Every structure is written in structure tokens, then in C-alpha cells.
Image (tube, grey):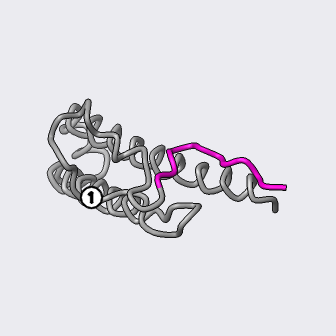
Amino acid sequence: MTESGQYEAAWAALRWRFVVQYAVVAVTIAALMAKGFVSQWLQVDAGVVIVVCIVAILGLNAWIYRFPCPRCGQLFRKAWPPSYRPWQWDYLRTCQHCGLRFNEIPRETP
């Protein structure tokens, strides 16, 4: 596999992690909206389903934060934001160690 192919595969893996997380969030919201239906359909209390979904979201969040940078191999993200202003959250899209941006594929050197 070429170097650019390795970057593409790594970014695809990170995007897949986001897709799985968003799917679980959507299931959690749906379970909240249809608590009575979920309780009857699964024969379990809706609160249990919601707790399981929230634990899954937390686990998926940890999975996303454990993503290694394709360039340097260090963790791509820090665990805590430097500020709580979303417009300043560039740290989510940039490796904190080597500066590689999310979805960036460096040019191959000849």
C-alpha cells in the first residue's frame, strides 16, 4: 500500500468511528422518544436501554480519542479541550504532536 493509501485508510477508519458513534446517539435519542415502545418490544425497562446507550457513547468517545495519528503515531486528540468555545476547537482537527490536519494526505516525496 502506498503512503497516501495508508493515510486514506486511517482517515476512513476515523470517519467510521464517527459514523458508529452518531448511530448510537441516534438510537439513544430514538429510545428516549419511544420509551414505552422500547419497554414493550424488548421486555426491558427503557431506562436500562438508555443507560446501555449512554455507556456505549462514552466507550465510543474513548475509542475516537484513542485514534493514533497516521503520521507520528501519537494520539491525534487531547482528552480535554483547551477552552469551552466551540469556534476555538481547532485541536479536534489537528494532531497535537505533529500538526497533521484531519483528512490531510501529505504529498509523497520522490
Taking depth in this image into account, of 72 and 10 the one nearest to the observer is 72
Q: Secondary structure at mark 1?
A: helix
Query: Residue 98 location in percent, x, y?
Result: 48, 59
Query: Residue 80 location in percent, x, y?
Result: 21, 56
| Vertical relation: 107 (above or below) 68 | above
Query: Residue 82 location in percent, x, y?
Result: 19, 49
Query: Residue 50 location in percent, x, y?
Result: 21, 50
Determine whether, in the image, residue 98 is placed left or right of residue 31: right
Taking depth in this image into account, of 67 and 82 the one nearest to the observer is 82
The part of the image, by quadrant, that contains residue 93 is top left
Q: Which quadrant of the figure contains the C terminus?
A: bottom right
Residue 4 on the magenta segment:
no
Taking depth in this image into account, of 9 and 52 the one nearest to the observer is 9
Residue type marked 1: Leu
Residue at (22%, 46%) from the top-left corner?
Answer: 39
The part of the image, by quadrant, that contains residue 36 is top left
Residue at (30%, 51%) from the top-left corner?
Answer: 42
Per the rendered image, the range of residues in magenta is: 99-110
Determine whether, in the image, residue 110 is placed left or right of residue 62: right
Q: Disc 1 designates what residue?
A: 58
Q: Main secondary structure of the magenta part?
A: loop
Residue at (61%, 56%) from the top-left corner?
Answer: 10
Q: Which quadrant of the figure contains the N terminus?
A: bottom right
Residue 103 on the magenta segment:
yes
Dot 1 alpha-carbon crowd within 10 angstroms: few under 14, some 14 to 19, many 20 or more: few
| Vertical relation: 71 (above or below) 12 | below
